[in-house]
Image: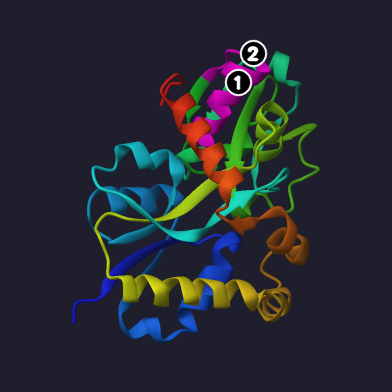
Amino acid sequence: MQKIKISVVSYLNSKPFINGLHNSGLLEKIDLQLDIPSVCAQKLLEGKVDIGLVPVAVLPLLKEKYVISDYCIGAVGKVASVMLYSDVPLNEISKVLLDYQSRTSVTLVKVLADKFWKIIPQWISAKADYENEIAGTTAAVIIGDRTFGIENKYKYCYDLAEEWQKFTKLPFVFACWVSNKQLSESFLIEFNTALKKGLDNRPELIKELYESKKYPTNIEVYLNQNIDYDYDTAKKQALELFLSYMGNSEQ
C-alpha cells in the first residue's frame, strides 16, 4: 500500500495535530513531513505530497484542491505569532521586510496596509536573519515560533490577526488542511479523528512542552486561546473575504 504523504507546519501551533497523528493508527499509512509554511505550500503545489497544512494564500494556485478537515490554524483576535514589528508607528514605516517562511502573512500585511492602515511602504523579500534589520523606518513581518520572547524588543508590535479583526470584525484563517486529490472517505474519517484526538489531548501535550523548555512563551494560553482550531462558519466567511482581497494586492 502506497503511503499518503502529508506536509505539516513545524511550528508550535501545529503540535496538537502532529501529536494526534503520531498517536493514531495512521502512522503506518502516512509519510509525515515537517516543514515551514512556504515549503508545505510548495510541496502540495508540486504534487510532492498529497495533503498539506498549507497557508491559505496558496489555495487559488492549486489546480485541484479539497479542504478535508473542520480544523485549521486560525485566530479570533490576537494570534500572538504573526506580527509586524517596528520602531516607528504605522504611518512612519517606509519599508517592510517580508518573512520568507510565509505566504499568507505576507499577503495579509499587504491587504491591511492597503485597505485598513492606508500606507504604501516598500515591500522587501527578506532572507535569513533579517530580524536584525528592523531599525528606523524599516519594519518586518515575523511569524511562528521566532516571535516568542521578542515581545519587548521593538517599540511597536502589530498582531496581524488582531488587526484583521479590527478591520473586518471577523476571525482569520492562516492554514487549512488541503489535499490535491480525492481521498477515500474512510481515510478522511480516520485522519480527522486523529486530529481531534490531538486537540483533545492538549493538556498532556502542554505539560510535555513546558518540560522541554523549548518555547519561551505561555504555551497554555497560546495553544488554548491564541490559536483557534475550529474551521467554522465565521472563519469560512473570513477566508472567502481574504481571498477576494488577494487579487487586489501585490503577491
Question: Is 152 situated left or right of 226 in this image?
Answer: right
Question: Is 50 situated left or right of 20 in this image?
Answer: left
Residue 103 x %, y %: 45, 39
Q: Nearer the viewer, residue 90 or 146?
A: 90
Q: Find disc 2 in the rendering and name its residue.
A: 118
**Magenta extent:** 105-122
Q: Residues within 10 Å of mark 1 (few under 14, many from 20)?
A: some
118 drawn magenta? yes
Residues at discs 1 and 2 in contact (Cβ within 8 Å): yes
Q: Nearer the viewer, residue 80 or 196?
A: 196
Q: Amino acid at mark 2?
A: Lys
Distance Cα–Cα, label 1 vs label 2:
5 Å
Residue 96 x %, y %: 57, 25
Colour setting: rainbow
Q: Measuring 61% from the left and 32% from the top, which residue is drawn there?
A: 140
Q: Quadrant of the C terminus?
A: top left
Q: Measuring 73% from the left and 47% from the top, which residue is drawn there?
A: 150
Question: Is 243 situated left or right of 146 in this image?
Answer: left
Q: Residues within 10 Å of mark 2 (few under 14, many from 20)?
A: few
Residue 244 x %, y %: 46, 27
Q: Which disc number belongs to residue 113?
A: 1
Q: Amino acid at mark 1?
A: Ala
